[in-house]
Structure formats: structure tokens, C-alpha cells
Image (cartoon, rainbow, N blue to C red):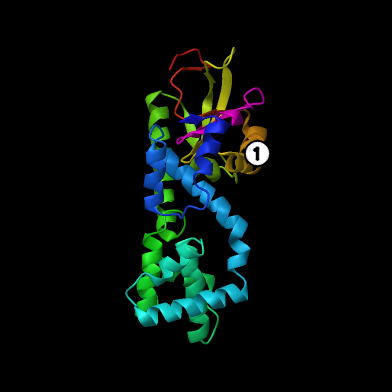
Amino acid sequence: MILTKAQYDEIAQCLVSVPPTRQSLRKLKQRFPSQSQATLLSIFSQEYQKHIKRTHAKHHTSEAIESYYQRYLNGVVKNGAAPVLLDLANEVDYAPSLMARLILERFLQEHEETPPSKSVINSMLRDPSQIPDGVLANQVYQCIVNDCCYGPLVDCIKHAIGHEHEVLLRDMLLEKNLSFLDEDQLRAKGYDKTPDFILQVPVVMLCPLAVEGHIIHWIESKASFGDECSHHAYLHDQFWSYWNRFGPGLVIYWYGFIQELDCNRERGILLKACFPTNIVTLCHSVA
């Protein structure tokens, strides 16, 4: 799904001050029925992450953490089964999983002899049954399963989706009888930063938006929507590095991208929202 900047901004504007819940996502789908669920979820998640980065500092002051902790303690004393921590996170507009981390760290600081390590915290968030307090374990669990933008459950889902699309792309390359090296093979050869696939036989992609074909040496798979923030970060951290090392390439944003970002075609980086069907290999066979 390719959106203009104006279309994207309209969707993003609807996300202002909206909690990161599945109910909010359903309302967004009702507001924009022509957009796919996956595209809206990706935009929803990315816009919320931008918001969290902008407001992160205010939630991490010692005063804020102590206030949240005391409110949590008072809440569970009244009703330990109620979603105290989840309601608190939504009230102060902070991601539930991140709120759970704050309270868990504060709890362990109070009850353990030594400060908890990051690995211990991460392990407890992945498996709340490890938390040495049944009420807090349940509260953390409620936050994790109700957060659709942050947390170990979301990280696991994102990793699985990313891998799924890489496998899908691999199958498409094989179907087209294209010779390639994947990321694991390239790293085995000593490359430290690589795209998902290097085409051993360069491909010319015949694009209806261009007068001439564009040569493609590599393909990167992104199971997300390409917005301005993420795309510019990828350009800086990955794509131009790939271009310098391997030549021109193709980035597939499976959930779409902002149309105006596809402005580097002549410089050697093309954007698509799906695997291109109109391609020709330089060994003159048509795929």
C-alpha cells in the first residue's frame, strides 16, 4: 500500500493522544477501511513509538517513578485482581510494557539486596512467573499481553513476521530462477553489514514509473511501513552502506511506504511494496 504524504499525515493525525490498544486499532480500521490491517498496525506502532521517545524522559524521573510505584501499591491493596498497572499506564499515556518494567525494577530494588541486572529484568518480563510476587506477576502479565507496540510478546511477533517475509522473498527469488546469496551466507564470507539478499546475476527491473530499467544487485526486505523517520534512519544506517559496497538495490516495504520517499531511484535505491514481477536478468532471460 503506497500512500502519499498527505494520506499518511491524515492517518497519523488520528493517532494523536490515542492509547496503544487493540480497541484503538479497530477504530482506526473503521476510519480508514481501504487500508489493510497490517499497514495500519505498522503505522500505528511506529507513530506511537515516536510519541514514547518524545515523552520518555518525563516518566523516568525519580519523582515520577516513585509516584507510579505508590499508586500501584495503593491500587493493588484495594483490589489486586484489577488491572491497576495497565490502567495506570493508559492514564499517564505510557506504554504498558514499559510501565511494567519501571514498576518491576522499583519493586526489585526494594526487595532485593543487589540492584537487578538488565538480563534478570528482561527474563522476568518474558516470563512473569519468575517474579517473586504473585500480584505483581499478574499485573506485569496483563501489561505485556495488552500492549500492541512494546514488550517481549510484540518483539517475538515482529521477529516472526520479519522472518516470514524473508522466507517469502526467498521463495519468490527461487521461483524466478534467480541466483542469490542470503544474509547468513554473506556473513560467513566475512561481511558484517549486509542486505537480506545479493543477486549473483544482476537484475533489471522494468518499472512503469521510469523511462529506463534500473539495475538491481541486492534486495532488502522490511516487514513494516516505510515512513519518513524509519526510512531516513535505514538510509543512513543500512541502505547507503549497501549501495557503497554492492551497488544499486531494491527495498521492499511489505506494508507500504510514503510515495514521496521513493526519490532515490536514479541514485540507485528503489522502493516497492511487493516483489516486482516485471524483471529481466542481464543474462537476457526474462523472469
- The residue closer to the viewer here, 164 or 51, is 51
Residue 221 higher or lower than 57, as above or below: above
| Number of on-image labels | 1
Does residue 274 appear in the picture of this structure?
Answer: yes
Residue 264 in which image quadrant: top right
Q: Residues within 10 Å of mark 1 (few under 14, many from 20)?
A: some
Q: Residue at x 60, y 69 (%)?
A: 60
Q: Is residue 33 magenta?
A: no
Q: Residue at x 45, y 76 (%)?
A: 72
Q: Is residue 264 magenta?
A: yes
Amino acid type, mark 1: Ser
Residue 4 higher or lower than 167, as above or below: above
Residue 9, horizontal then vertical, whole percent: 55, 38
Residue 229 higher or lower than 287, as above or below: below
Decide if residue 268 is on the left or right side of residue 44: right
Does residue 226 appear in the picture of this structure?
Answer: no
Decide if residue 158 is on the left or right side of residue 259: left
On the rendered image, what quadrant is the N terminus found in? top left
Q: Residue furthest left?
A: 81
Residue underneath mark 1: 241
- The residue closer to the viewer here, 135 or 129, is 135
Residue 114, horizontal then vertical, whole percent: 54, 84
On the rendered image, what quadrant is the C terminus found in? top left
Residue 81, horizontal then vertical, whole percent: 32, 74
Q: Residue at x 53, y 47 (%)?
A: 47
Identify the secondary structure beneath mark 1: helix
Which span is picked out in magenta? 249-269
Residue 41, horizontal then vertical, whole percent: 43, 44
Q: Residue at x 51, y 74 (%)?
A: 68
